[in-house]
Amino acid sequence: MSSNAQKSGFGATIWDYMTSVDHKKIAILYLMSGGLFFLIGGIEAMMIRIQLMKAGNDFLSAGTYNEVLTMHGTTMIFLAAMPLLLGFMNAIMPLQIGARDVAFPFLNSLGFWLFFFGGVFLNLSWFLGGAPDAGWTNYASLALASESHGIDFYSLGLTISGFGTLISGINFLVTIINMRAPGMTYMRMPLFTWTTFVASALILLAFPPLTIAIFFMVFDRLFGSHFFDVAAGGNTIIWEHLFWIFGHPEVYILILPAFGIFSEIFAIFSRKRLFGYTALVFATILIGFYGFMVWAHHMFTVGLGPTANAIFALATMIIAVPTGVKIFNWLLTIWGGSVSFATPMLYAVGFIPSFVAGGVTGVMQAMAPLDYQLHDSYFIVAHFHYVIVGGVVLAIFAATHLYWPKMFGTMLSEKLGKVTFWLFFIGFHLTFFIQHFLGLMGMPRRVYTFGADQGWDLFNAISSAGAIFMALGVIILLVNVIMTTVKNERVGNDPWGDGRTLEWAIPSPPPFYNFAQTPLVRGLDTYWIEKMEGNKEGMIYAEPLGDIHMPNNSFIPVVMSFGLFVASFGALYHPDDLPWTVPVIVLGLLITFGSMLLRSLKDDLGFHVHKEDLIKDREGVKTDGHQ
Amino acid sequence: MAHDVHEHVRTKEEYEYVRRQRAQEMRHMLTSFAMMIFLTLIAFTAVAAGFSTYLIVPIILLLAAIQVVLQLYHFMHLSNKGSGTIAFFMFSGMFVAFIVILTFVTIIWW
């Protein structure tokens, strides 16, 4: 590998991405596969809305509707929102802390491929006898009764992709703790890095309960155990607890990075330092802690008893406090700033009222007695789409526009970006606002159809019309991406003109070693400080120019993940009494553990980028030449 | 380069300082060792004296928690400089696990 980029063929590019351990390339992989699953999940959403657009519709059968609904939720949470956010974390966080890569580049690649094969496995269920049909929460009494292999695709697929997420989370934690550039103290870290840090800590603590729950589920369904089987002495409620012990932190794993992205956007496009940086940091940490103390609010109607309900209700309401602190800090960041309404800023400003609406309905549901009324109605559907779409998806779109130049070196069209925003924003409110009222009128969640005499026709039709706007918005975003890529107009280091953090001080896209010299950080908003002091280089350096040690590419992560993918098929068909299932499990595990062994035994010491090449690179990038 | 080897010769003052530090550390270890033995004795005595189980179990759990903290700080050097993050994550994890166990014990298995 050389630092001089060369034109390479299509196959070589594919091979390069499959073997890459570069955090920026892995970010692009996350973005592409997360984007693909987002489109699949979006198509499933459209099918749901087509089915519900009028009373007594027969577009989908009841059984298919259950599958589509389950896969929409599962895909959007596990295979779209999380990987897209992990993609942005990968792309930006190491740049923000002045690191050359994440702490464990090999594991980073492994994390991606585990997620990818898990996602593919889950989606193969469509072609292999039916998708999971017990809802994304997969409650055990329902899931154990499901007859097709759908639930097994769910549990095995999520096991694999869950490993991937856990690996990425640990990787980010180690990176942020150990690889910050000199001078980058914790309280000088950009807010996106902070939220990445806290979200990774949540991944570390929240994914093991999910892994355990799914492991029990796999053994209950495939290998004859009875963890959740009440008839055989198990306890079905334990699944619900374990799932939500994971599930509630999970929504903070999604929303905290979104908060981070918006914090960056508010500061950049208001041309102001973030108001109350310290408060924002501590609010983030606090939300992380509270996230683990509230899971039972998803289970108020299970019958936990009034004491447990009261405790969890109070704990839930407390979360509104740090979140409110954040909202006010963002508003005060905008206040008095020299605001420019570029596309990312539109998303950020649109996010505040949308997310507050979702938060307020959240506090309503935190009141246990009221929740008895709202539970399992469309009010809940409206609430969580307001926080997930109004928070996370808007953040993902905003980050796509904001960081596209940093990741690909070209600017997405501002004009089309604004069209996307307005279509999506209007469509989103049209689709989901009215669902609050459908819920209050008594329409239950997860029903595949409703009667003409129930009075829900008009509101459902409006809701379905809104979904069309959202779909148009996404299509225009895709057109935007294609047009931008074809035009290929290169941009400089700081295309928005007001970048504040380190990632804007280096070329777009950055060279594969990110920083020729490790930067020295003199305060919060590092790049802004240097800019204000007239430093044309954009940063000062903590070390002289010298050789850089970089990791080698590796194909092993793909093989390792593929082994688990193969083993999963063996496990899946195990209860069908087929002769080949055990050999396939063994073969798959052999592939995985064999490649692990290979990785352990074979020394892979990486390579050095030499000083001369760095100087040559730098001359290619900069006109004024000397270092 | 980072791999250059530095020979560092200690001055007399540094030597004395390190010596004092080590002596102090040793004192702490011995003290907590004695305390641990004492705590263990209490636990055994409580069982041998035949108190009610509802008294013994919480006492033993409490003593165990104290033992863990003593062990972590005096023998596993959690108090050393640079262990702050580790301690923070460990206690966060314990906190989360504690809440989960508490909930399970009180509302599922009670």
Image (tube, helix red, strand yellow):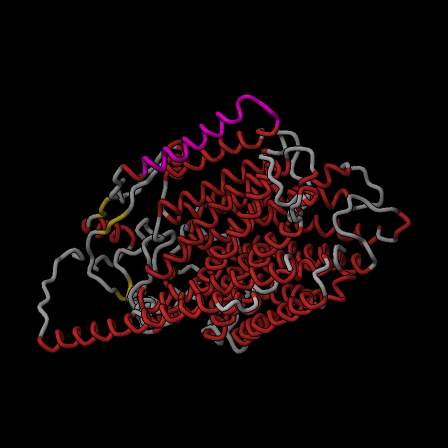
Residue A407: horizontal and vertical position, in percent? 42, 51
Query: Is most of the magenta stretch helix, strand or loop?
Result: helix
* Point 19% across, 60% down: residue: A544
Residue range in magenta is A576-599
Q: Is residue A24 above or below residue B87?
A: above
Q: Residue at x 29, y 42 (%)?
A: A552
Which quadrant of the figure has residue B15?
bottom left
Where residue A282 appears, x then y in whole percent?
Answer: 48, 72
Q: Would you say residue A276 sits in the magenta stretch?
A: no
Q: Nearer the viewer, residue A617 or A443?
A: A443
Percent x, y of residue A9: 37, 32
Which residue is rendered at x = 21% and y = 52% of the image? A615
Q: Is residue B100 left or right of residue A29?
A: right
Is residue A415 among what the camera can see? no
x then y, percent, for residue A131: 65, 36
Q: Nearer the viewer, residue B33 or A272?
A: B33
